[in-house]
Image (cartoon, rainbow, N blue to C red):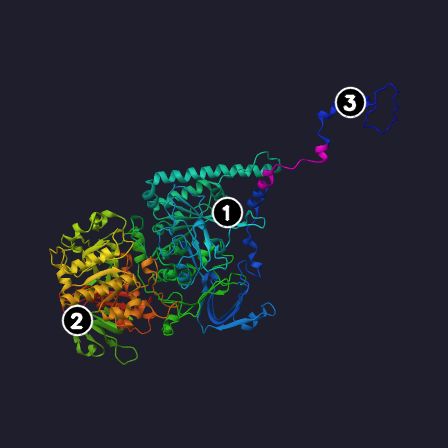
Amino acid sequence: MGLPSPFSRSESYHPSPSTPKWLPYLPLLLLLPLVPNPLSTLFPPPPPSFLQHGLDECASLQRPSPALSMGQRTVSDRFVKGTGSFLLINGTLWTGNEGGEEVIYGGSILLENGLIKSIGRSKEELLKTMGGGKDVEEINLGGSWVTPGIVDMHSHLGVGSLPELDGSEDTNSIKAPILPFLRSLDGLNTHDAAYNLSIAGGLTTALILPGSANNIGGQAFVIKPRQTAENTPSSMVLENPFVIDEAGGIRRTGFERHMKHACGENIHGVYGDNRFDQAYSFRKAYASATKLRNKQDEWCKVGQLNKDPFPEDLEWEALADVLRGKVRVNVHCYETVDFDQLIRLTNEFKFPIAAVHHAHEAYLVPDLLKKAWGRIPTAAIFATNKNYKREASRGSEFAAKILSEAGIPVAMKSDHPVLDSRYLVFEAAQANYYGLNTSLALASVTSTPAKALGMDHRIGYLRAAYDADVVVWDSHPLTLGTTPTQVYIDGIPQLTSPHLNPSKPSKYQVAPTPPSFGNEADIHKQTRGDPPYAELIEKKVVNDLIFTNVSHVYLSDGDDVEERFAGEGSEEVGVVVVEGGKVVCLGKKCLEEFESMKGLEVVDLKGGALIPGLLSYGSPLGLVEIVQEESTQDGYVGEGLAFGVADVLKDELIRAADGASFGTKDALIAAKFGVTKAVTAPSSAFIHGLSFAFSPRASNPLSPNAILQEATAVHLTIGHGYGLDLSISTQIGVLRKLLKGKTADEGAWWKKVAAGELPVVIETHKADIIARLILLKSEIEFETGKSIKMTISGGTEAHLLADELAAADIGVILTPSRSIPATWDKKRHLAGPPLTEQTPVEALISAGVLVGLGIDESWSARNTRFDAGWTLLGSPSLTPQKALALVSTNLEKLLGFKSSSKDVRDRDWIAVEGDAFGFDGKVVASGGGGKRGDGVALF
């Protein structure tokens, strides 16, 4: 009989006294190495320290976004304790719902706990939804338009902060082409002067992107620009993907992230990488990210049995999340070749893109964009800003219309500070003007970007449980010069004692009726972005014609703009007769006096007007075709200044006319939109030279009336930041010597300036510099007994010296007409309503200063008529005549343009169908008499 099992309790065992007591347990001892440690079974060792971290990471990768539950909110995650409740009644609410078609007239909206609590028509029903015991401030909107807050999906607010100073620019890193690990949040300046200005334009949310110097520039963050109690960048982020947890560590929240990619010229310019290199850089980066994602996914499958730490790599972790669909990719991309490369990349590595930005050629290839993996990207575009580099040279003002009709979502963006995000709604209004329908135009700065950002669960609409980001406007949001009367962000009013314009015409309370541009959108597509502008501005040229249904005629004699005819509210028939290009008859009598008119061309102006031809100044129009292409421009004067000023001062002044280029896109477009004259000076950092006046319609320098005046004024710049290493005192000292005749003056131009025979136009912005120029003018005039014709161009801080400028008889060309504190020299700007009562124009004019409006960039010459209209609407003391003078006769005087005739019949004029100042109007004809002899061009 064998030994009983030591585990058996079925038999009794009684060893003999001589048997060792441990002997029965010998088999057990021999088997112990072969079985698990019983102590480890009862008391397992703790898992490796890395395991829990990895398991947490795996869980976070699978966790649904908190955004999914936000529809049930009663209190916003951004609610600030102490914020009151507001009941806005009697508003016209554009909600963004029903594809942007829903408008609630006489509507009410309740803001509570940082949210839109409820929305509807009945004030009583809304109040029932309030929490008990709460007070509410009731505000009667008087029918004002109300929209969701404006959303800018391409901004550099905070990272390209204003005023621009050394150390304030954090938009780009130039360490390498691929930098997915960088974060715009790490450079977000909470003191950017543009935050409050942008809010004053209705902006409530912005995607802050890194710049475009890299193929992958880093991670972007969606912020709300209001000041927070914490006053930190993190507290501005709308849905932060990483937060500091209670234990003092960094915790993933599950919210989506955002990433900036770029392709094309910018990377080529910084790194020398051509498109071959860039494509490989993208593919190599995503291949590395794919490896990391696969390793992480495998680790998560193994779970608790992993013996190695969770695979992590700071360089590629964000791109791995792109591949998981947890990061929204926004791509700076212009040309067809780049879109093609991008779309192939998304399909190779299977990731979606949220939007293509700038996208100037996207309207030419909408079907290609639809092939992007996962979803159709939004096109985030400008309205009319183009031709500033080769990639942008085939852009079209009809792009928004064409893209939307092809099924591509369209968002308008600012690229702030490239365009001032305060006026982002102006981009939407222009898109509407060129054919994007009203609903989609409003959506392009509200719900469409909100959706592209993955934020349409909380912003972009007027809906219950959405963030209380609401804008109340003084007119329809797509009308020219529309201005917020109040902006709410998270239910907090942002405008303290806003200054309102009570005199907006009633017609601005309804959506504009954009004019017809016929088949021009098709022409832009058919010509692949290179339409025949010369033909479009002269579809037909006639000498004689009749305008009917004319409401006003404003004509100039070279000194002033006068109202020559007003048909509104009178029995006069709005008729204007033109013979030989000259306006020869106005009003009812024309029908009786001209029996032979039956065979003349008849143009119905539909309540429009004849106004003076517009003058453009301030940009390199006529000297530059493509700003960033040296071979397409005249070049830069004064490179020798790096070696001192003496060499320049002894030379003859440079003449801009010698470097003129005619038939440029921007010039022809300007002509198409009513610019009949332009004055342009050479480009320089200090002494520019002599400006010239020319016709933007002319095809070459030898065309009749191409160059209207060889030399109009002497130009120079005094200030900081123009690439000139000379002190302000040195610059003014040199000007003093020039005016006193103490330097060589071979052409006697400076002598003419000192004698008052030729204007001197000085570009400067700072009030202190302007004050010294006032004193210098007085000094020279005292010595010579002559009156100098001095004009300040720029003039951002000129309003601070309005009385002194008027007393010194110094005029100002405000450039641009709506200022921004871009540099230290411009920081004391006058913002205008709703932040200040006066506009810069009104402040200067009311003091008696002669004022004109200028532009910075050639592409914006087309908007000269809108600049005049915007100024008229924002400055109640202005008359239409004075507004038109800002862009015609005043500029002529300030720039030294001499008319060949004082006869109004010999002056340039344009005919505007519809509203002469707004988005209901369109320039349909341009004419002039006297020596021009061009007849009337019908557009």
Which residue is denoted by mark 2 in the rendering?
905
* Amino acid beneath label 3: Pro
Q: Which residues are magenta?
A: 39-54
Q: Give the Cα distance between marks 1 and 2.
A: 66 Å
Relative horizontal placement of residue 591, taking residue 181 as reference (left or right): left
Relative horizontal placement of residue 13, taking residue 669 as reference (left or right): right
Indicate the quadrant containing the C terminus: top left, top right, bottom left or bottom right: bottom left
Q: Is residue 514 above or below residue 303?
A: below
Q: Earlier in the sequence, mark 1 or mark 2?
A: 1
Q: Give the Cα distance between marks 2 and 3.
A: 125 Å
Q: Earlier in the sequence, mark 2 or mark 3?
A: 3
Rendered location of residue 706, percent (x, y): 16, 59
* Amino acid beneath label 1: Lys
Q: Quadrant of residue 344?
A: top left
Which residue is denoted by mark 3 in the rendering?
27
Please give the label number shown on residue 326: 1
Badge nearest the viewer, 1 or 3: 3
Please give the label number shown on residue 470: none
Q: Earlier in the sequence, mark 1 or mark 3?
A: 3
Q: Residue 413, can we see it? A: yes
Q: Residue 853, can we see it? A: no
User: Label 1: few (<14), some or many (≥20) within 10 Å?
Assistant: some
Relative horizontal placement of residue 899, taking residue 717 as reference (left or right): left
Magenta stretch holds residue 43: yes
Residue 474 or residue 831, whichever sits in front: 831
User: Label 3: few (<14), some or many (≥20) within 10 Å?
Assistant: few
Q: Is residue 63 above or below residue 874?
A: above
